[in-house]
Image: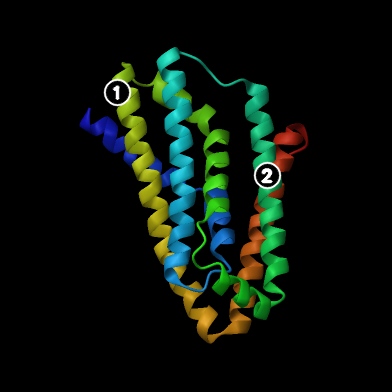
Amino acid sequence: MIHFMLFGFLLGIRHALEADHIATVASLAASRRSKSQVLYQGLAWSTGHSLTLLIIIGALTIIGGSIATEMQLALDIFVGVIMIWLGLDVILRAKNLAQLRKEDVMGTDKLPFKAFSLGLLHGVAGSAALLIIFTEQLDSMLDSILCLAAFSLGTMSGMLVFSVLLAVPLSFTASRMVYLQYGVQCLIGTVTGLLGAGILLQQAFPHFL
């Protein structure tokens, strides 16, 4: 059992560091000036993601259900659209750094509901593939639920580590190098948008890619 849970934990770390997850959290954190705000974004996203997986996969494991292919496809397409919107949003907000700083200071105490909501969405979109891993590869329901819990903990740990690494350059450029911060935000927005477009095209037009 211990080695299965360790596998789930390590798989969760790897899952957190997938390109679309990294790009989404980086876009959410791009306009944050303090390390704590960046950490809040990563923590909120991973909490929403893990909560969705625990609820959906846990419930489907207990009742023996599955996620329809059509629903999974629709969710993946929606994730792609949201990532394109996030990328454009980061680029547009970066064009006015003075206003961006004003909004950032005003929004310091706000809870990161956007990050939490996007974490929920990513969790729903990724639940079908993970359901197969946690139900077909393990012998008992208890094993599946415990491994899922370890996976969720690994996802939160992986994203927290990434957020810590991301917080240092973002907070540094925000306070000392305005134009470099602008370039970093535009780069993050562009990469996020391109990844979203890739997901959208892959899911909507799989035969052309």
Q: Position of residue 26 (x, y in %)?
A: 54, 60
Image quadrant where one finds the C terminus? top right
Q: Nearer the viewer, residue 195 or 208?
A: 195
Q: Nearer the viewer, residue 204 or 111?
A: 111
Residue placed farthest to the top in the image?
64
Compared across the picture, whether 15 is left or right of 92 comes to left
For disc 2, the neighbor class at 10 Å (few under 14, some 14 to 19, many from 20) is many
Q: Nearer the viewer, residue 162 or 96?
A: 96
Compared across the picture, whether 27 is left or right of 147 comes to right
SS assignment at label 2: helix
Q: Quadrant of residue 149?
A: top left
Residue 143 - label = 1
Report whether residue 27 is seen: yes
Q: Quadrant of residue 29?
A: bottom right
Q: Amino acid at mark 2?
A: Gly
Q: Position of residue 133 (x, y in %)?
A: 43, 26
Residue drawn at x 57%, y 71% is 106
* Residue on which the image places disc 2: 80
SS assignment at label 1: helix
